[in-house]
Image (tube, rainbow, N blue to C red):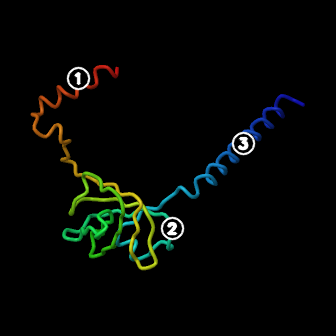
Amino acid sequence: MKAKHQRLVLVLLAIVALVGAALLAVYALRNQASYFYLPEQMQADPPAVGQAVRLGGMVAPGSLETLPDGITVTFTVTGREASAIPVRYAGILPDLFVEGSGVVAEGRLAADGTFEADNLLAKHDENYVPRELQDMSEHQAAEMAEETTVGLE
């Protein structure tokens, strides 16, 4: 076989291997993918009942309620429009989770239209400052950051 034909065979084998690897990756990740919905999108075109999705929006003021078991909370996630999705979550709430803040809930839509969250991610605004740094001046915070990064270089 000529060198030109050998190179062609090697290139074709490499392409087949890459396509095979891509197909295996897509097959392995098919159940891990979860789509992101805003409340108005979820109302307009709801996902299938039981399908893993993410719901993002703002926690409606006055909607946070702890059920008698002390672990389960219910609240409403709102979007930019007048849309609202009721959410139920059983577990420990993130520290930054408060009414009026942003939230991303991972879970599934129940048959009754309630979003059953398995995980909550609280979002903070661009003015967030960790509790440890709240009482420090900007100069003191910069010094603390410098001290913590000295050993990382």
Residue type, mark 1 in image:
Glu
On residue 17, the disc is: 3
Residue drawn at the location 25% of the way across and 57% of the way down: 97
Q: CA distance from mark 2 to mark 1?
A: 46 Å
When the figure is inspected, residue 113 is found, relative to residue 105, above or below; the finding is below
30 with respect to 4 (left or right): left
Circle 1 sits in a helix, a strand or a loop, which is it? helix
Which image quarter holds the C terminus? top left
Residues marked 2 and 1 touching at CB (< 8 Å): no
User: Label 1, on which residue?
Assistant: 147
Q: CA distance from mark 2 to mark 3?
A: 32 Å
Circle 3 sits in a helix, a strand or a loop, which is it? helix
- Residue sitting farthest toward the right: 1
Residue drawn at the location 45% of the way across and 67% of the way down: 108
Residue 78 is at least partly visible in this image: no
| Within-10-Å neighbours for mark 1: few <14, some 14–19, many 20+ | few
Residue 7 is at least partly visible in this image: yes
Residue 38 image offset from top left, x and y in percent: 36, 66
Residue 147 image offset from top left, x and y in percent: 23, 23
User: Label 2, on which residue?
Assistant: 51
Mark nearest the camera among 2 and 3 is 2
Which of pointers 1 and 3 lies earlier in the amino acid sequence? 3
Residue type, mark 2 in image:
Gln
Q: CA distance from mark 1 to mark 3?
A: 48 Å
Of 144 and 44, nearer the camera is 144
Of 127 and 92, nearer the camera is 92
Residue drawn at the location 38% of the way across and 74% of the way down: 114
